[in-house]
Amino acid sequence: MALTGHDIAPDDPIMALVVLNQLLLPRVAEEVAMILTNTNQDALDALGNMRKETLQTTAGDLLLLASQAKEMLKVDLTEASGRAAAIVAGIESGLRISRAVWIAVGAIGCAVFGLGLIVGAALER
């Protein structure tokens, strides 16, 4: 009576509604709480599954990218090795030509020296 400001007698028909509310409300509240708890658990499970699937997908993508990067690196290394081999072959070819030139210069020098000796010996006689 003090809560509503209305005078309610114990034999008033509204008291039946109050008693029904007191009897049913705890059970309804428990059912609603159970439904909310189950719904929250379902949402938590779904989020856990989404997280797991996301991590698996991301891990798979990372493995694929790592594999592709590895293959690209192999190709780059193969190309670099080929270019290095071509450079070394060019240097070796240049060295052979350089050696041949110096051998020819040496042979010409020896021939000129020998010719000088012959001319010198001929002039001395």
Image (spheres, helix red, strand yellow):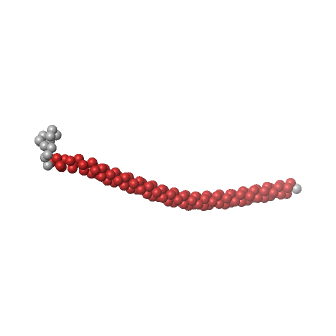
The image position of residue 93, as x and y in percent, is: 66, 60
Please give left or right for residue 64 compared with residue 5 in the image. right
The quadrant where residue 100 appears:
bottom right
Taking the spot 80% from the left edge, 58% from the top edge, the residue there is 115
Q: Residue furthest front?
A: 11
Please give left or right for residue 13 compared with residue 84 in the image. left
Taking the spot 54% from the left edge, 58% from the top edge, the residue there is 70
The image position of residue 34, as x and y in percent, is: 32, 52
Please give left or right for residue 80 compared with residue 119 in the image. left
Please give left or right for residue 58 compared with residue 93 in the image. left
- Who is closer to the viewer here, 28 or 58? 28
Is 2 located above or below residue 114 in the figure? above
Q: Residue furthest right?
A: 125
Classify the position of the C terminus by image quarter: bottom right
Taking the spot 19% from the left edge, 47% from the top edge, the residue there is 18
The image position of residue 76, as x and y in percent, is: 55, 59
Is residue 27 visible to us here?
yes
